[in-house]
Image (tube, grey):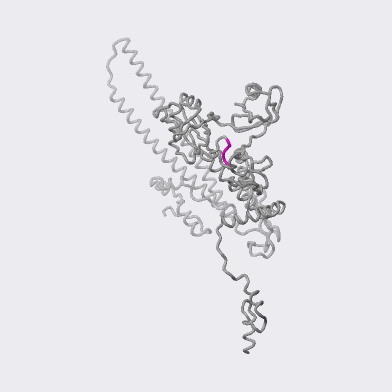
Amino acid sequence: MAGSASAPLLSTPGIYNPDEGGEDDEIQAMEGTEWQVFQSKSTKKKQAVERGMSQPNALRSSQGCVQLGARSSRRAAALKKRVIAASRMPELPSTHRKIIVRPRDGLDLRKTSCYGISTAIFTAAGITAIQASSDLVCPNVVQNIVVVCTEKEDNARKILALKNIRVNGKEHEVAVYAAAEGNYVKGVIRNVERDIRDAELERLIVHQGNPSVRGVKRIKDTGSVVVLFDGGDVPGYIRVGQAIVRCYLYKKQMEVCSKCTRVGHRADVCPTPMVNVCHSCGAKDPKQGHSCLLRCKLCGKGHTTGDKACKQKYQTPFVIRQRRKEREMERAFDMDLRDFPTLGAGMPRPSSGGWLQPFTVGGGSALPITAKWASKAQNPEPYRTQAGPSTQVSGGTVTANESEELKKVRNENAKLSSELAQVKNELASLKNAVSASRQDGDQNGANGRKRRAVGDVPEVDVTDSLNQIKESLKLISSTLQEITKDIVIVKAQNRFIDFRLRDLECKMGLPEPEPLPTELSQLISDPTVVAELVQKQIPCPQSNSQAQSRDPKAQPCTKTKC
């Protein structure tokens, strides 16, 4: 037992065992267990660069591609996103003119206060603080430019004439130009002759044949010309003189400085123009005979930053980004619709004996075929099921008592309709009588005036006539009130008869009756209407509805008082 228990301990690596080996075995077992010295990230990076420089170029390039790989691509994409986000300007007034000021001679806006920049610009332009009270100055530290917004034409003219500004006691040359105004997009045409001047280009392109064109500008000394369009669309073709030329959507380039190799600004506004930087790897103050790996800061591939072959050199235009968002939203909406299929589509057929099957009288297990009201009225046949013999639902048969009651209700409805028509005729005749009496009074008054104008007429006491007219008007108003009450009662009776008719139809197998109408409830709440219903021995609708809510098979309430 002792030997077996001690065997695993003696065979454990790293512990000296005189029975198994000598001193060399112990040294080999203890290798790699010494203390390791901590190294910072910069030290490890420097050692990796030195190891890479000591290797051949082909081996370094292959190992660099394997080690960087997706990591460098992700870093480059993150850098591009950060630069684009930091380059965005805040929302500026749309009514102001935008003027771009590009400082030269190494003016770093990151190390200069915004107030100092604005003071230097307005001082050089000769604009006082009162005149510049509504103007705005917004520096863009990523692009190293300054945007001046002004709504005064005089201030804009003075700022556009600037050549130099004085910041921190040093003169700096500036290039100033006005930005395009309004809602516009840019297009580009290619392979345009380089000997054509800007004035000739504007004459060939800006005319009535291209109504949406607002301006043109050549890209440096190349054959590409930027065309400014009003609105949000770039046409596929435009007229250049008499020729029809293909027009492409302008894609803004990622600005890469050729002096400091930083992304975000151009070489003419570089804040550090005197710095010595390797254009391949971006190392500062490289040694003589410096060898490095090519790596693009925009895509992480093996070429210089901002090379023509770089696929991340151009920014995605806003129009394309907006269209992509709309398409993504449409796809998401389509997927949401797919999650909710149409009713009746793809529903499984019920199987015989399933627990979802409803109970049928004839023993059939399938769902009954529902028929419309028109088909039921034309073909009063018993309902048939998909499976099983023809059966008749006992609850939907019409008994003799119910048919007689239905006929009675219809007769009452017709009688009430005739009474209502008679009441309307009486009301119309009364209105005609009142209007005729008024016309007679007007004519008598006119004749009296004529008689008084002709000669002396004996005075007549009209007090009795006025009293008689007042009494007749009171009688007419009371009659109208009684007629109005009769009309209200007739309406209530019609509504209640309709309600009873729907109740009977429901018992015959039709859809369930609707709840008591709100108008009928309001009429029944009137005490005068209730009194009239009681006098005429008409059942109360509320009692019938309450009884039916308690027991669906209960007969309508025949009591006159609830």
Vertical position of residue 316 compared to residue 36: above or below: above
Vertical position of residue 542 compared to residue 456: above or below: below
User: Can residue 382 be seen here?
Assistant: no
Image quadrant in which you'd find residue 181:
top right
Q: Residue at 28% of width from left, 24% of height from top? A: 463
Looking at the picture, how far across and down is residue 126, in whole percent? 43, 26
Looking at the picture, how far across and down is residue 199, in whole percent? 62, 22
User: Can residue 424 be seen here?
Assistant: yes
> Which of the pair 484/215 is nearer the observer?
215
* Secondary structure predominantly adopted by residues drawn in magenta: loop
* Residue furthest out toward the bottom: 1
> Which of the pair 292/113 is nearer the observer?
292
Vertical position of residue 461 compared to residue 560: above or below: above
* Residue furthest out toward the top: 454
Q: Which residues are magenta?
A: 263-267
Image quadrant in which you'd find residue 382:
bottom right
Looking at the picture, how far across and down is residue 240, in whole percent? 68, 24
